[in-house]
Amino acid sequence: MRSNNWDAVIIGGSDPHSSEYPAPRWKQVEWVSGFTGEAGDIVITLDHAGLWTDTRYFIQANRQLEGSGIVLHKTRVPDQILIPQWLSENAFPEKESVNIAIDGLCQRVSDIEELKSAFGEDTTVRIVSIPDMLDAIWQDRPAVPVTPIIELADEQVGESSDDKIDWLRSFIRKKGCNSMLVCALDEIAWLLNVRGSDIEYNPLVISYLIITEEEVRWYTRESYDDIYVAISENCGKMYVDPDSLNYHIYTMLPKESIVLGPSPVALRKAVKNEVEIESMRDAHLEDGLAMEKFLFWLETSLENGEQVDEWEASVKLSELRGEIQGYAGDSFETISAYGPGGALPHYITPKTNAPKLIRRGLYLCDSGGQYSFGTTDITRTIPLGPCTRMEMEDYTLVLKGHINLAMAVFPKGTAGCQIDAIARMPLWKTGRNFGHGTGHGVGFFLGVHEGPQDIRQNFNRQALLPGMIVSDEPGIYREGLHGVRHENLLLCKEAGSSEFGEWLDFETLTLCHFDTDAILKELLNNDEIKWLNDYNERVFRTLSPRLPAEIALWLRDKTEPI
């Protein structure tokens, strides 16, 4: 930094495609700091090093950064100071000129524009983009991965790639453009009806896509770097989404020839067609069978006095999912957390010396599967034995919030941020809360997290639409004690109309019982009790015909009404 006259270096936590989960090559934040969370950026000045991350990772970050000299800067809290504001007001409040170095491949255009604007007119901000900046010191840096490409048949996804491309070309024309550069990997996979495994847990192919009136040019690993030549060619007026376009490519595009705006693909992809919806129902049926087999195995193993630790439980669940035809791996790294580990929303289960599961207290398991016919995401908090009054209160109140959201009916046009409080109210009334969002979108054999919809307190104006799939996962976390989270996936659907307008509600897709042993019944009202009993009964009636007799009998007992 001194030799190059850089005042600050920003190390981003993403990749050249703004992916939530980068391949190992782009886990630069982890390499620099040891922080393994999925969301985090680092800023280094000559006298400070800081990590910016959100509420999901505070406990984890404090532990992993201990002794490193790197300071945790908290985001998604009321008094947050984000990177642009911190650099302009705290690091260099009176400097007339600031040189900030970045790896332009791993910074979004929108983030850099926000950074520049934070300084105002009195400071000249010079952005120095150094692609693959860390190559000089990261000696064993992984290469860009290459995995086989899977082509999905039209009948698997309900719409041909040709039809999707024709739809996108119509959008491009309406924007007065001749072409579009698509950088987001899940959008490319959806448009072309292809999948891969370049990124762990994500069935994606690292690539770029250019669509013109005459051609579809797909730049995969063998031609990945050719994108730099392609964008310098005359593609006429090119439409690009600044939220997935990296800054390095942006600097190479002739500014008079590009139109920046949000990609229409994310919203179109989020609204599932009938084939995708039916397949997702099938995926949750198969996944539910694996979950019930796992929970039966877990309970009987502990009852028989067998030693089971968090990692062994995680491996067992993956093995059971692996028996399902069409299984393509887990949809994220399983969070298998007993007791205090459950207090970390994104706990990393250790492979060695993992905590043993004991027949008391709460065990939290957040997991999911990727299948050729869908993607699942489910969390169950399981009482392994006697629980404290606090554990039972937390367990019941979180479940109460989960049920309230699952039962929600709301006007068409409602955004997720407008119903987030429904899941929080039982907790708020008792002075409790959780720091993460209540729900995220889920892809079809794609990313377990997708937008543009979500259910959280951030002011996201995207309305929930029929065909969207979202999670319902309120929680509560007590550091050093326990964590509780209950998660199902919900399908948004039409719920009729009245003189007051059109209405929407949810269909619960996930099929796995909620354990009633830790419930304080007096904290639930009659509607909530009915929903719980009806749901558990549906789980039993749907799954028991396909379960081994002893597991079906066990499930009958587990789903008896309260």
Image (cartoon, rainbow, N blue to C red):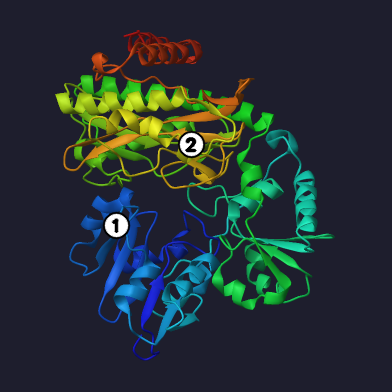
Q: Is residue 529 left or right of residue 66?
A: right
Q: Is residue 355 left or right of residue 407?
A: left
Find residue 346 and report its horizontal and vertical position in percent.
Answer: 33, 46
Outermost residue toward the front in this view: 499
User: Cβ–Cβ below 8 Å for labels 1 and 2?
Assistant: no
Find residue 153 and report its horizontal and vertical position in percent.
Answer: 72, 39
Query: Is residue 445 or residue 394 the one in the foreground?
Result: 394
User: How far is mark 1 from mark 2, CA to CA?
Assistant: 37 Å
The residue under label 1 is 79
* Amino acid of disc 2: Gly
Q: Residue at x 53, y 70 (%)?
A: 105
Outermost residue toward the right in this view: 214
The residue under label 2 is 369
| Residue 408 visible from this viewpoint | yes
Find residue 92 and report its horizontal and vertical position in percent.
Answer: 33, 80
* Amino acid of disc 1: Asp
Query: Is residue 451 or residue 422 the one in the foreground?
Result: 422
On screen, residue 467 above or below 552: below
Query: Is residue 78 or residue 148 the one in the foreground?
Result: 78
Q: Residue at x 46, y 61 (%)?
A: 14
Mark 1 surroundings: few (<14), some (14-19) or many (≥20) residues within 10 A: few
Q: Residue at x 66, y 50 (%)?
A: 264
| Residue 53: quadrant of the picture | bottom left
Sequence-first disc among 1 and 2:
1
Q: Residue at x 80, y 49 (%)?
A: 166
On screen, residue 409 above or below 336: above
Q: Is residue 343 left or right of residue 288?
A: left
**Secondary-structure class at tag 2:** strand
| Residue 232: quadrant of the picture | bottom right
**Secondary-structure class at tag 1:** loop
Q: Nearer the viewer, mark 1 or mark 2?
A: 1
Find residue 209 and report its horizontal and vertical position in percent.
Answer: 69, 60
